[in-house]
Image (spheres, rainbow, N blue to C red):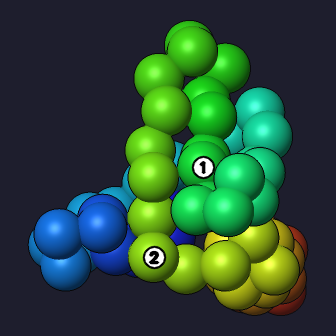
Amino acid sequence: MIELTRMNGKKFTLNCEMIEKIEDTPDTVVTLGSGKMYIVQESRQDVTDLVLLYKKEIFSKN
């Protein structure tokens, strides 16, 4: 799970396993496999880095 920020400043936690794609359009749009889309304040690279950090944390516990 990663924490992201909506455009209105509210934070939310997203299950990053559900992410299908991340786009800069110029706002960052995170699209889930279900088709649900979130526009977030973080950059595409920031979201990618958060996902990688989460995965490293999960896999290092094994």
Amino acid type of the residue that numbered disc 2 sits on in the rendered structure: Gln
At x 47% / y 23%, what residue is drawn? 36
Residue 35 visible in the displayed image: yes
At x 56% / y 13%, what residue is drawn? 34
User: What residue is pinned by disc 2?
Assistant: 41
Which numbered marker is on residue 20? Answer: none
All told, the count of numbered labels is 2
Q: Position of residue 29 (x, y in %)?
A: 60, 49
Q: Position of residue 40 (x, y in %)?
A: 45, 64
8 with respect to 24 (left or right):
left
Q: Position of residue 57 (x, y in %)?
A: 72, 85
Tell me: residue 46, above or below residue 16.
below
Tell me: residue 39, above or below residue 19.
below
Tell me: residue 21, above or below residue 23.
above
Distance between the alpha carbons at the discs numbered 2 and 1 = 9 Å
Image quadrant in which you'd find residue 41 = bottom left
Q: Nearer the viewer, residue 42 or 61?
A: 42
Residue 58 visible in the displayed image: no
49 with respect to 34 (left or right):
right
Label 2 secondary element: loop
Which numbered marker is on residue 29? Answer: 1
Amino acid type of the residue that numbered disc 1 sits on in the rendered structure: Val
- List the single residue furthest toward the front: 26
Label 1 secondary element: strand
At x 67% / y 62%, what residue is drawn? 26
